[in-house]
């Protein structure tokens, strides 16, 4: 376990350094993956380093990464990698972005790491071992009233057919929570919920690499994560309903009214 966590720590920090240099270089170049989805050479470089480091230590392990591909499987060791979560922020020179790596064994999370290189925030968790930010144990917030909750959400790049759902969720939130944020990195949104900054985080149309590490980090900090139905969270369903736990059922009842 120690070997895995140490590798995770070193690898996300090294990849984070690549992103930090890219961010500081002011080279705003990118390519389009799709109409609204952009990718930079630093997404690629970060994933290349991550693959080299992990396979250098564990050549038999599998990797499933946003840029390099792979297969999401419930068998054996699988490292799920988002080499740059928050690419839109990165390109627009907003510092809220990170590297995210989740390590899974037979479909179960073993360890997760998220590193935001500009703010130098390193989030790490081992299953059953708690969650830490820069070495300090984290705990979700104790907010128990919806009208005191800071709610964070996000929107997909492909929005066709999804605007009504977003509007309904936003309307529900505007009439129930204290305030709303859209930050731009799903992995960090989960870590900030784990750290008690946000109280509720809901998003649809995510990919496994967006949440593989953050889901474990949140749970290890005492938070709850589920599907919108309240059923057990699954990486392959794309939706995340995360909270400090105290607010979970209240938030499901109030924020999801009419959301389909
Ligand atoms: C995106 C971010 C964003 C979320 C998008 C993701 P990317 O990841 O996590 O917060 O709303 O759905 O695709 O493209 O920056 O790796
Ligand atoms: Ca992502
Ligand atoms: Ca990404």
Image (cartoon, rainbow, N blue to C red):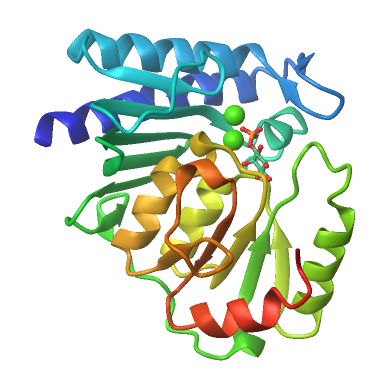
Q: In the figure, residue 91 lies in which quadrant?
A: top right
Image height of 75 relative to 62, above or below:
below
Side (left or right) of 110 relative to 49: left
Which residue is found at the position 35% from the left and 40% from the top? 113
Say which residue appears at 32% left-offset and 42% top-offset: 112
Question: Looking at the picture, how far across and down is residue 118, in whole percent?
Answer: 53, 37
Is 54 situated left or right of 67 in this image?
Answer: left
The relative height of residue 114 versus residue 164 in the rendered view (above or below) is: above
What count of labels does the image hold? 0
Looking at the image, can residue 118 be seen? no
Q: Residue at point 58% right, 65% down?
A: 228
Q: Is residue 70 left or right of residue 3?
A: right
Say which residue appears at 57% left-offset and 37% top-offset: 207
Please, is residue 32 above or below residue 179 in the view?
A: above
Q: Is residue 227 above or below residue 5?
A: below
Ligand 2 is found in which quarter of the picture? top right
Q: In the depicted view, which residue is nearer to us: 82 or 120? A: 82
Answer with left or right where residue 157 lies relative to residue 132: right
Q: Nearer the viewer, residue 180 or 136?
A: 180
- Give x and y (percent) for residue 153: 68, 59
User: Can the viewer see residue 58 in this picture?
Assistant: yes
Image quadrant containing the N terminus? top left
Please provide percent x and percent y for residue 117: 48, 35
Query: Which part of the image, by quadrant, shows the C terminus?
Result: bottom right
């Amino acid at each position: 376990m120690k070997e895995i966590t140490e590798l995770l720590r070193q690898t996300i920090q090294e990849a984070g350094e690549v992103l930090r240099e890219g961010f500081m270089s002011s080279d705003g170049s990118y390519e389009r993956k799709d109409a609204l989805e952009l990718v930079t050479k630093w997404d690629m470089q970060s994933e290349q380093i991550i693959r080299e480091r992990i396979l250098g230590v564990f050549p038999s392990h599998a990797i499933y990464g946003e840029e390099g591909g792979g297969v999401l499987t419930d068998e054996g060791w699988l490292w799920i990698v988002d080499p740059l979560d928050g690419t839109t922020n990165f390109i627009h020179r907003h510092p809220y972005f990170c590297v995210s790596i989740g390590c899974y064994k037979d479909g179960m999370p073993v360890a997760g790491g998220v590193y935001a290189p500009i703010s130098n925030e390193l989030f790490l968790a081992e299953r059953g071992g708690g969650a830490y930010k820069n070495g300090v144990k984290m705990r979700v917030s104790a907010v128990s009233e919806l009208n005191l909750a800071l709610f964070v959400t996000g929107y997909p790049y492909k929005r066709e057919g999804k605007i009504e759902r977003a509007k309904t969720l936003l309307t529900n939130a505007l009439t129930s929570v204290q305030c709303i944020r859209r930050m731009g990195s799903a992995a960090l949104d989960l870590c900030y919920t784990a750290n008690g900054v946000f109280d509720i985080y809901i998003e649809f149309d995510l990919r496994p690499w967006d949440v593989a590490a953050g889901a474990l980090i949140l749970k290890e900090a005492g938070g709850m994560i589920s599907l919108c139905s309240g059923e057990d969270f699954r990486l392959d369903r794309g939706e995340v309903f995360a909270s400090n736990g105290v607010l979970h059922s209240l938030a499901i009842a109030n924020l999801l009214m009419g959301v389909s």
